[in-house]
Image: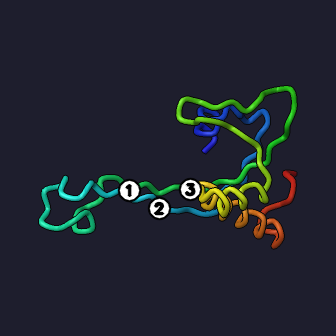
């Protein structure tokens, strides 16, 4: 996770403190276009082309003059947004990634409220 964040956002251990374990995980399963795999049926009858297991991690960010978040080669933009802005993007704009990110952020918030994740790094 740290390498990806550094590659795609330009943030390093200088400003990030990582929770030691992933907080949740999800699957991203991609099937071939219908008929592309040579099977008799549609895509649901075919084996997946790609199956990614994505571990969502949690880090605290300490802003400062050391580094600034900048988009890398796979990122179109980098932005700091509130939970309300994520929720608005998910509901008003129908942004699928906002909905997925919002779920992970809400999971982290619940874990902090329950004491599973410390509110601030020690």
Q: Earlier in the sequence, mark 2 or mark 1?
A: 2
Label for residue 25?
none
Which numbered circle lies on residue 51?
Answer: 1
Q: Residue at x 70, y 67 (%)?
A: 107
Quadrant showing the N terminus: top right
Which label sits on residue 55? 3
Q: Which residue is mark 2?
A: 27
Q: Is residue 29 left or right of residue 62?
A: left
Residue 96 shown left or right of residue 120 in the figure: left
Name which quarter of the figure residue 68 lies in.
top right
Q: Nearer the viewer, residue 57 or 89?
A: 89
Q: Residue at x 77, y 44 (%)?
A: 80
Q: Quadrant of residue 71?
A: top right
Q: Position of residue 85 (x, y in %)?
A: 76, 55
Q: Is residue 69 visible in this depiction of the protein? A: yes
Q: Residue furthest front?
A: 92
Q: Position of residue 33 (x, y in %)?
A: 26, 54
Lower sequence index among marks 3 and 2: 2
């Amino acid at each position: 996770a740290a390498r990806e964040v550094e590659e795609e956002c330009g943030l390093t251990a200088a400003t990030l403190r990582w929770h030691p374990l992933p907080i949740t995980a999800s699957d991203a399963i991609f099937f071939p276009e219908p008929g592309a795999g040579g099977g008799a049926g549609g895509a649901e009858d075919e084996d997946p082309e790609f199956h990614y297991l994505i571990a969502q991690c949690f880090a605290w960010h300490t802003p400062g003059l050391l580094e600034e978040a900048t988009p890398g080669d796979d990122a179109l933009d980098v932005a700091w947004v509130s939970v309300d802005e994520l929720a608005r993007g998910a509901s008003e704009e129908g942004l699928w990634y906002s909905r997925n990110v919002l779920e992970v952020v809400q999971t982290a918030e619940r874990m902090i409220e329950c004491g599973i994740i410390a509110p601030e790094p020690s």
